[in-house]
Image: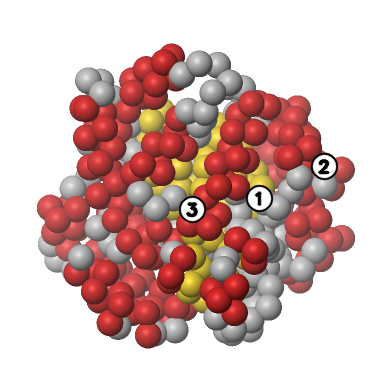
Amino acid sequence: MLYRLAFQLALSRIDPECAHVLAREGLRALHAAPGGRALLGALLEPPHPCLRVDALGLSFPSPLGAAAGLDKDATWFEPLAALGFGFVEVGTLTAQPQRGNPRPRLARVASERALVNWLGFPNRGAVAAAARLRRRPPVTAGAVPLGVNIGPSRAAGARGELSDLRLAARALAPFADYMVVNVSSPNTPGLREAQAPARLRPLLEAVREELNAHPRRVPLLVKLAPDLADAQLQELAELALALELDGIVAVNTTVDRGVLSTAGSARVPFEGGGVSGAPLAPRALQVLRLLRATAGARLVLVSVGGVTDARGVLERLLAGATLVQAYTGLIYGGPAWVAGINRELVRAVRAAGQESLAGLIRARAQATPRGAPA
């Protein structure tokens, strides 16, 4: 309630990109202050053990993670984890530093709990990010799993994207608990064309070669757009299976401004970009079900797009997601939003008479007729 009031009275009046920076620096300062971590733990509570998810050879304290985009430059992954996220995915990181698109490039549509972003992968490059990630404690020392999301540098162009991705993967593999190749952002010209199987296959094979050179196994996933036709999504799921990828992250933002009301779209001060948040939820759920039907149990599916509450998280898990991610939901929900969802999930487990979230999902799946919506 306090956050909602602060958002309405103050934060909503600040440029959204500036507000993001303020939130990042404030949380970083609190996390670094003496007693700050203990205070966050006392106020927000770590996820209950019953929420643990085992996937990708990792143990996730909660199925809800921070989506790529919240920590684009790998500068506040530990404070984000302290909010109660079960994992954090940093990036998208590129081999070469880049400024991203000119401002304004981020807009709120608060009436629809949505964002429109045209950021364009602003980051200081993979080598600089690796230096920051080097200081992170490993998962074996209690850190939550860290995903590293990489994409081609804009300067590389289509001709240089293969070697460019290799450089990013090589620099970041030692610090990634899993890696995601992002070819689905609408904010880099021509990038989504890399989702064509003939172009995507060599990119994924190149990244896999770099990861295989690392002594520790690093799972590989690919992130897909919601704007692909169902037949294209099925084809890409088959490609992921053929290449023996570990999973798919679905979905990125949508270029379809039609998911917003006419009034909401008119408030966005730039052309282009992608819509995230509540309006994306129906398509994200549809894509999830399609991918699960195509891949069966052979791929880990990470569902992202439009999750606003615990019911939404549970809906994705029942529809076939292994893990769930959020970004826009945190922006509108505030710092206590993640811990609140974790508590609601624990209540759902107990109300169902189960000992774990995994048990709840299994019980619901057994009770749902084949082919019926979960």
Q: Residue at x 64, y 66 (%)?
A: 257
- The residue drawn where x is 14% and y is 56% is 43
Q: Residues within 10 Å of mark 3 (few under 14, many from 20)?
A: many
**Image spot of residue 253 (x, y percent):** 60, 58
Amino acid at circle 1: Pro
Tell me which label, 2 or 3, sits earlier in the chain.
2
User: Which corner quadrant holds the N terminus?
Assistant: bottom left
Residue 249 seen anywhere in this rendered image of the structure: no
Residue 54 horizontal/vertical position (percent) = 41, 28
Q: Amino acid at mark 3?
A: Gly
Q: Residue at x 53, y 58 (%)?
A: 279
Number of the front mark, 1 or 2: 1
Q: Secondary structure at mark 2?
A: helix
Residue holding disc 1: 226
| Contact (Cβ within 8 Å) of mark 1 with mark 2 | no
Q: CA distance from mark 2 to mark 3?
A: 27 Å
Q: Specify whether 174 is left or right of 137.
A: right
**x, y percent for residue 39:** 13, 59
Q: Quadrant of residue 263?
A: bottom right
Q: Dot 1 surroundings within 10 Å: few (below 14), some, or many (20 or more)?
A: many
Tell me the residue that label 2 is attached to: 197
Q: How many marks?
A: 3
Q: Which residue is mark 3?
A: 306
Q: Whole-percent x and y of residue 197?
A: 82, 42
Instruction: Give the structural element (helix, strand or loop) at label 3.
Output: loop
- Mark 2 residue type: Pro
Determine whether the residue tagged by mark 1 lies in a helix, strand or loop.
Answer: loop
Between 253 and 5, the one lying in front of the other is: 5
